[in-house]
């Protein structure tokens, strides 16, 4: 797939002088390889094509990446081709907004006849930011946000593609203004304590592969999340493997379970009964209910899931929604069935909607987990910018799941020992 590079030389808005400013944006596909066959209740894969986006204005630059899982309607929507399409439309829309200020421009991609520069309007406003831009460089980046919002208004671009472009723009604006992304979004004052990073162990074909993955993950963090389907015997095998490796620490909840929509209320209650011995080690159960819960009449078996939530509360376990949690509009409907939600930028559409979802969670007393799709360190670094939105647990393990050869950069953090003596707390690296 062809990369797309667009650039502009523009005159400063309202400036009488001949000052010029340079803007560059670039979309690139990113083929990634997982360290092992990545299997969930949804799909299995060893290779994926993610997308990256780079923004630079007058030498201030930032990049982003989105993880693009196998397509699943309503849950995982968006391909690298969708991201490429948006990058082209975004470039033309930005040209439209810059207007007569453009002194020169170019792109590696030919114009498509289907482009409609006026489609959806220009987005208007200030991009929904909490802080006014001061310099010309900052105003250009806000104009870029307006161009993206104009593209979004058409309704044709999946949230993963919107997240790709938006996060790169906002990371660049954060650097240009010298303030963190949360300050731009007015979401300061979030979680201040240690943040634990879980490593996700995929579903394994046999006990040896499971043990191998457990050893690899636990070498980086003692907090492990396991992909499970509707099979209690597999769950017992997982905990047996953890026992064999000496990874079940008395009095410590270091295990998370991700059912990926595969359970029903009866199995969920039976799961708790059959694994009662191990429940003191379980911190969280993620997305046990179907994706459609609670969004369709056919899936409304809410009473059973509400009882399951209550039972988990009795056991000291929290239930989080993942696939069912897309944008802030989903938060209120999920509250009766879970204690919190997993906010992922690719599903939300970027930083701004993630901030709105966080505010909705805080208003309703729900917890927030930050998660990533399968991706590289760049994808994790984008999420680390808003680390404080979590309530203390995340799974920013993409750089551990993917092979070293496909990493476009190093992680901006390390996994260190926390106050409880367990390894796996995120510690930001100090810029040299």
Image (cartoon, rainbow, N blue to C red):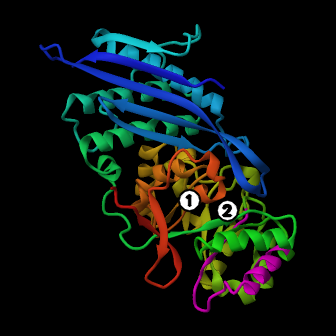
The residue at the point 41 percent across, 44 percent down is 352
Bin the neighbour count of mark 1 within 10 Å (Cα to Cα): few under 14, some 14-19, many 20 and up.
Answer: many
Residue matched to label 1: 342
> Is residue 16 rendered magenta in the image?
no
Residue matched to label 2: 287
The residue at the point 68 percent across, 74 percent down is 307
* SS label for mark 2: loop
Which quadrant of the figure contains the N terminus?
top right
* SS label for mark 1: strand
What is the C-alpha distance between the residues marked 2 and 1? 9 Å
Residue 254 against residue 162 in the figure, above or below: below
Image position, residue 149 (x, y; %): 43, 29
Image position, residue 218 (x, y; %): 64, 74
Residue 20 visible, this orientation: yes
The stretch in magenta equals: 234-259
Residue projecting furthest to the left: 16
Which badge, 2 or 1, comes first in the chain's sequence? 2
Depth check: 111 or 307 in front? Answer: 111
Q: Is 344 on the left or on the right of 233, as rendered?
A: left
Image position, residue 408 (x, y; %): 54, 44
The residue at the point 57 percent across, 54 percent down is 372
> Is residue 247 rendered magenta in the image?
yes
């Amino acid at each position: 797939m062809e990369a797309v590079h667009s650039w502009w030389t523009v005159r400063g808005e309202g400036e009488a002088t001949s000052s010029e400013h340079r803007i560059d944006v670039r979309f690139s596909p990113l083929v990634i390889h997982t360290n092992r066959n990545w299997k969930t209740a949804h799909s299995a894969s060893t290779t994926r094509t993610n997308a990256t986006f780079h923004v630079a204005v007058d030498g201030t630059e930032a990049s982003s990446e989105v993880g693009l899982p196998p397509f699943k309607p309503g849950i995982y929507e968006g391909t690298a081709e969708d991201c490429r399409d948006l990058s082209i439309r975004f470039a033309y829309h930005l040209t439209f907004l810059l207007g007569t200020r453009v002194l020169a421009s170019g792109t590696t991609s030919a114009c498509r006849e289907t482009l409609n520069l006026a489609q959806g309007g220009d987005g208007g406003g200030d991009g929904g930011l909490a802080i006014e831009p001061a310099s010309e460089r900052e105003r250009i980046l806000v104009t870029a946000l307006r161009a993206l919002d104009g593209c979004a208004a058409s309704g044709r671009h999946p949230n993963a593609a919107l997240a790709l472009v938006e996060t790169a723009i906002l990371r660049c604006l954060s650097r240009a203004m010298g303030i963190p992304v949360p300050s731009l979004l007015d979401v300061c004052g979030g979680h201040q304590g240690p943040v634990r990073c879980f490593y996700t162990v995929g579903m394994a074909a046999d006990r040896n592969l499971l043990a191998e993955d457990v050893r690899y993950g636990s070498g980086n963090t003692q907090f492990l999340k396991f992909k499970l389907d509707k099979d209690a015997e597999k769950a017992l095998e997982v905990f047996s493997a953890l026992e064999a490796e000496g990874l079940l620490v008395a009095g410590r909840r270091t295990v998370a379970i991700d059912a990926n929509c595969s359970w029903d209320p009866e199995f969920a209650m039976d799961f708790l009964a059959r694994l009662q011995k191990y429940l003191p080690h379980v911190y969280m159960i993620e997305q046990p209910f179907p994706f459609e819960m609670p969004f369709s009449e056919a899936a409304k078996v809410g009473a059973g899931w509400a009882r399951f939530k209550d039972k988990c509360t009795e056991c000291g376990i929290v239930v989080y929604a993942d696939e069912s949690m897309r944008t802030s509009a989903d938060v209120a409907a999920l509250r009766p069935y879970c204690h919190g939600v997993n906010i992922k930028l690719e599903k939300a559409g970027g930083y701004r909607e993630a901030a709105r979802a966080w505010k909705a969670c805080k208003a309703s007393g729900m917890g927030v987990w930050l998660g990533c799709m399968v991706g590289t360190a760049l994808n994790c670094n984008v999420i680390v910018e808003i680390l404080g939105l979590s309530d203390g647990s995340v799974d920013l393990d993409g750089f551990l799941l993917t092979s070293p050869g496909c990493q476009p950069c190093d992680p901006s953090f390390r996994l260190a020992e926390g106050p409880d003596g367990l390894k796996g707390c995120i510690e930001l690296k100090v810029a040299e």
